[in-house]
Amino acid sequence: MSYLSYSKIRPFLIGILAIGVACNLYFYREDVKMEKVVPQSFVVVEQYCRASKGSSSINIKYNGDQYSVRMANGECLKYPVGAEIKLVYNDTHDYFYKQDGLAKVSFRLFLFSFLLLLSVVPWNRLLKKKLK
C-alpha cells in the first residue's frame, strides 16, 4: 500500500490553511468590533459544564429564543443557573460574544498563520542546500 507523500498533499494543506487564515481574520475583525460595544447582562437559564475536556456552554434567553454560549469548563462553572453574564449580541451573524480581549481568536489566527508559513517554506530545498 502506497502512502501519500508530503509533496503530493502539500498544495491541499496550503489551501486549507489559507482558508483557515482567511476565516480567522474575518472573525478577528468581527470580534474587534464586538469588543468596542458595551455588553448587556443576561440571565443563565441552563448550564452544561463538562468535567472532562471538551466544550462547555450556558444557555440564555433573548427575544424569546434560547441561545447557547460556548466557553471553557472553568469559566462555565462561574455561571450557574440564575447567574448574570455580560455578553454582546452580534445581530449580523445571530450569536452572542463574551468579551475576552480577543484572546481566543488572536491565538487561532496566530496558529493558522504560523502553520501556513511553515507549510509554504520549501524545507526540502533549504535542507539540501545546508547539507551540501
Image: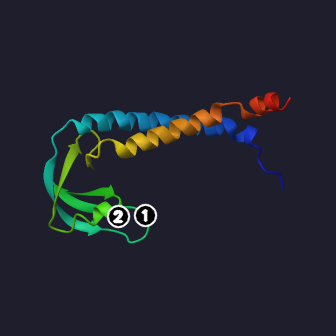
Instruction: Characterize the local packing of mark 1: few (<14), some (14-19) or many (20 or more) Cα atoms within 10 angstroms.
Output: few
Q: Nearer the viewer, residue 38 or 58?
A: 38
The residue furthest bottom is 51
- Give whichever of discs 1 and 2 has the lower sequence position: 1
Give the residue drawn at x 21%, y 68%. 80
Residue type beneath disc 1: Gly
Identify the disc placed on residue 12.
none
Snapshot quadrant of residue 43: bottom left
Snapshot quadrant of residue 51: bottom left
Q: Secondary structure at mark 2?
A: helix
**Residue 86 horizontal/vertical position (percent):** 18, 51
The colour style of the image is rainbow
Work out which quarter of the rendered image holds the C terminus and state it.
top right
**Residue 32 horizontal/vertical position (percent):** 29, 35
Pointers 1 and 2 in contact (C-beta within 8 Å): yes
Position of 39 with respect to 128 (left or right) is: left
Residue 47 visible in rendering: yes
Q: CA distance from mark 1 to mark 2?
A: 8 Å
Q: Is residue 111 above or below residue 63?
A: above
Q: Mark 1, mark 2: which one is toward the viewer?
A: 2
| Disc 1: which residue | 54
Q: Nearer the viewer, residue 85 or 96?
A: 85
Work out which quarter of the rendered image holds the N terminus and state it.
bottom right
Q: Secondary structure at mark 1?
A: loop
| Disc 2: which residue | 73
Residue 63 visible in rendering: no
Give the residue drawn at x 29%, y 46%. 100
**Residue 114 horizontal/vertical position (percent):** 54, 37
Position of 25 with respect to 77 (left or right) is: right
The residue furthest right is 132
Residue type beneath disc 2: Asn
